[in-house]
Image (tube, rainbow, N blue to C red):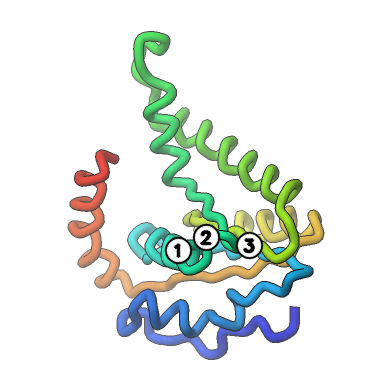
């Protein structure tokens, strides 16, 4: 859609979540007759989840949020216990989460109302994966916007201990 341009790339290390949301305002404005999927991708620790939650918290009636990491957490909670006497390998949790994440996206594409948006929080490190998601979304007649959060490697490593502490507090 015309008008949905962020402009030049800003040095991510200098920005706060509020700065990023401010720079994204033209993208976040959804016309009452359209639907939009923001595909947030980037390496682990790049701020996808923080940005996703901030966007949704700004307008809970307009934006919904789907997280691949949340699906993995749910898999580990649901697919354990006495009915699963043997530990499930991490690869199976990822496989289950992938299927559920895609199902969630499909359900939103089929049931969402005009004037709403979905924020997808997923690493999508391969260009082929990003293009596949965009193709599926646009085949449903819905606009998609790719937002790639790009950190320098040293910043990501500096954030790693902080993220691990947050996971310990959340129990993930």
Q: Quadrant of the N terminus?
A: bottom right
Which residue is found at the position 61% from the left and 54% from the top? Answer: 129
The disc placed on residue 117 is 3
Neighbourhood count class around disc 1 (C-alpha, 10 Å): few under 14, some 14–19, many 20 upward:
some
Q: Examine the image and state in which quarter residue 46 appears.
A: bottom left
Q: Confirm or deny contact between disc 1 and disc 2 (CB under 8 A).
A: yes
Q: Confirm or deny contact between disc 1 and disc 3 (CB under 8 A).
A: no
Which residue is found at the position 47% from the left and 39% from the top? Answer: 71
Q: Position of residue 153 (x, y in %)?
A: 31, 70
Q: Is residue 19 above or below residue 171?
A: below
- Res. 127 in view: no
Which residue is found at the position 61% from the left and 42% from the top? Answer: 104
Q: Is residue 5 above or below residue 123?
A: below
Neighbourhood count class around disc 2 (C-alpha, 10 Å): few under 14, some 14–19, many 20 upward:
few
Q: Which residue is mark 1?
A: 57
Q: Position of residue 87 (x, y in %)?
A: 34, 18
From mark 2 to mark 3, how far is it between C-alphas?
A: 10 Å
Q: In front of the other: label 1 or label 3?
A: 1
Q: Which residue is mark 2?
A: 60
Viewed as shown, does residue 112 lie left or right of 69? Answer: right
- Res. 58 in view: yes
Neighbourhood count class around disc 3 (C-alpha, 10 Å): few under 14, some 14–19, many 20 upward:
many
């Amino acid at each position: 859609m015309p008008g949905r341009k962020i402009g030049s790339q800003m040095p991510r290390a200098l920005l706060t979540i509020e700065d990023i949301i401010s720079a994204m305002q033209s993208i976040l404005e959804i016309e009452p007759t359209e639907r939009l999927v923001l595909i947030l991708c980037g390496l682990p620790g790049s701020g996808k989840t923080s940005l996703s939650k901030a966007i949704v918290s700004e307008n809970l009636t307009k934006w919904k949020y789907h997280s691949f990491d949340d699906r993995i957490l749910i898999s580990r909670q649901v697919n354990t216990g006495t009915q699963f006497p043997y530990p499930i390998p991490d690869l199976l949790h990822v496989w289950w989460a992938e299927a559920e994440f895609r199902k969630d996206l499909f359900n939103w594409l089929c049931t969402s109302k005009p004037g709403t948006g979905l924020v997808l929080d997923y690493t999508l490190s391969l260009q082929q994966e990003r293009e596949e998601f965009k193709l599926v979304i646009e085949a449903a007649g819905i606009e998609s916007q790719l937002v790639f959060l790009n950190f320098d490697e040293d910043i990501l490593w500096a954030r790693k201990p902080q993220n691990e502490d947050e996971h310990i507090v959340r129990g993930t």
